[in-house]
């Protein structure tokens, strides 16, 4: 497999390529993740479906969506449950990151930058952290997408930017999408979420004011650098968590054009 060509030349880019528009009413940051050489209409990415309307559900029905893969924490999902309005959809919860108790059991002790969250709040610290601790979830996502009956699928988190952004970028890179195109899809979240002018505030699941930050090539590259420095390749990154060559062959068969 050709490894991602991680370059810093356009690290300041915030504006996205305008590709694969798939609007779903009242769902933030929804779009087709099937950029070339992936097939369109098979893998979608989005923010939470907790505000999905009946019109939005009809749109998902027309897209043929069979599975929603939710990368949010259990607490987020309980505060903002997904809405499906009677759709025949399988809802699969795969929290991208462990909770604080699990992290401590794993020997992680420095939570000084977490500010009450189960992950660092500074994006510069968050992305290498996700690269390390989201590996089991990304592997479970790959295994699910390797099942033809799961497709088309939507991968979602709170706003579809960080957890979903990294997971989708890993899948796109696994399947040979050029790095520049992976980045263009990744930073498109800035325009979708109106972050091109800088961070915006929001209330989190505990009612605490937080800030949503723009994403950039630098952030994504920091995660990929962490992965490739430790594991040398994306298949080697996923293998300890159960992803086999057969899973990767099935993923290619399901998602490549």
Image (tube, helix red, strand yellow):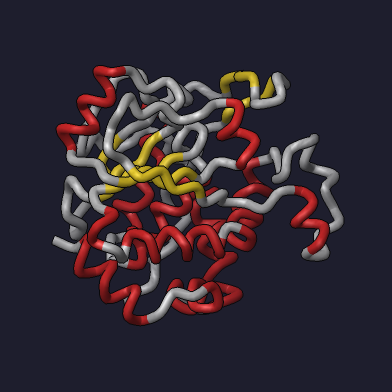
Would residue 33 be seen by someone viewing this image from the given angle?
Answer: no
The answer to whether residue 110 is left or right of residue 143 is right
Residue sitting at 54 percent across and 72 percent down?
A: 241
In the rendered view, tell whether residue 62 sits above or below residue 3.
above
Q: Quadrant of the N terminus?
A: bottom left
* Res 61 quadrant in image: top left
* Res 86 quadrant in image: top left
Q: Position of residue 40 (x, y in %)?
A: 17, 48
The answer to whether residue 4 is left or right of residue 231 is left
Q: Position of residue 48 (x, y in %)?
A: 45, 31
Residue sitting at 45 percent across and 72 percent down?
A: 234
In the rendered view, tell whether residue 3 sits above or below residue 148.
below
Residue sitting at 28 percent across and 18 percent down?
A: 54
* Res 85 quadrant in image: top left
Residue nearest the observer in this picture, 216 or 40: 40
In the rendered view, tell whether residue 50 sits above or below residue 74.
above
Would residue 235 be seen by someone viewing this image from the given angle?
Answer: yes
Q: Where is residue 128 in the image (x, y as percent from the top left)?
A: 62, 56
The answer to whether residue 210 is left or right of residue 137 is right
Residue found at the far bottom of this picture: 245
Number of marks in picture: 0
Q: Where is residue 170 in the image (x, y as percent from the top left)?
A: 42, 60
Residue sitting at 51 percent across and 51 percent down?
A: 94
Q: Quadrant of the C terminus?
A: bottom left
Residue nearest the observer in this picture, 4 or 144: 144
């Amino acid at each position: 497999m050709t490894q991602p060509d991680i370059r810093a030349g356009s690290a300041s880019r915030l504006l996205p390529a305008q590709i694969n528009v798939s609007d779903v009413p009242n769902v933030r940051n929804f779009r087709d993740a099937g950029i070339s050489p992936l097939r369109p209409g098979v893998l979608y990415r989005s923010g939470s479906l907790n505000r999905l309307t009946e019109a939005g559900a009809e749109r998902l029905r027309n897209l043929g969506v069979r599975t929603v893969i939710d990368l949010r924490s259990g607490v987020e999902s309980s505060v903002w449950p997904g809405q499906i309005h009677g759709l025949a959809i399988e809802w699969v919860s795969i929290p991208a990151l462990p909770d604080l108790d699990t992290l401590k059991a794993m020997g992680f002790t420095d939570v000084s930058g977490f500010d009450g969250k189960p992950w660092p709040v500074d994006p510069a610290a968050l992305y290498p952290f996700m690269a390390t601790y989201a590996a089991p979830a990304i592997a479970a996502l790959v295994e699910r997408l390797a099942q033809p009956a799961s497709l088309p699928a939507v991968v979602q988190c709170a706003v579809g930017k960080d957890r979903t952004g990294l997971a989708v970028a890993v899948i796109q890179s696994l399947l040979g999408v050029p790095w520049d195109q992976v980045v263009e899809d990744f930073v498109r979240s800035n325009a979708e979420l109106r972050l091109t002018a800088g961070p915006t505030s929001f209330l989190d699941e505990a009612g605490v004011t937080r800030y949503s930050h723009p994403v950039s090539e630098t952030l994504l590259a920091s995660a990929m650098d962490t992965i490739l420095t430790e594991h040398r390749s994306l298949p080697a990154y996923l293998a300890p968590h159960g992803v086999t060559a057969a899973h990767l062959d099935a993923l290619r068969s399901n998602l490549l054009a």
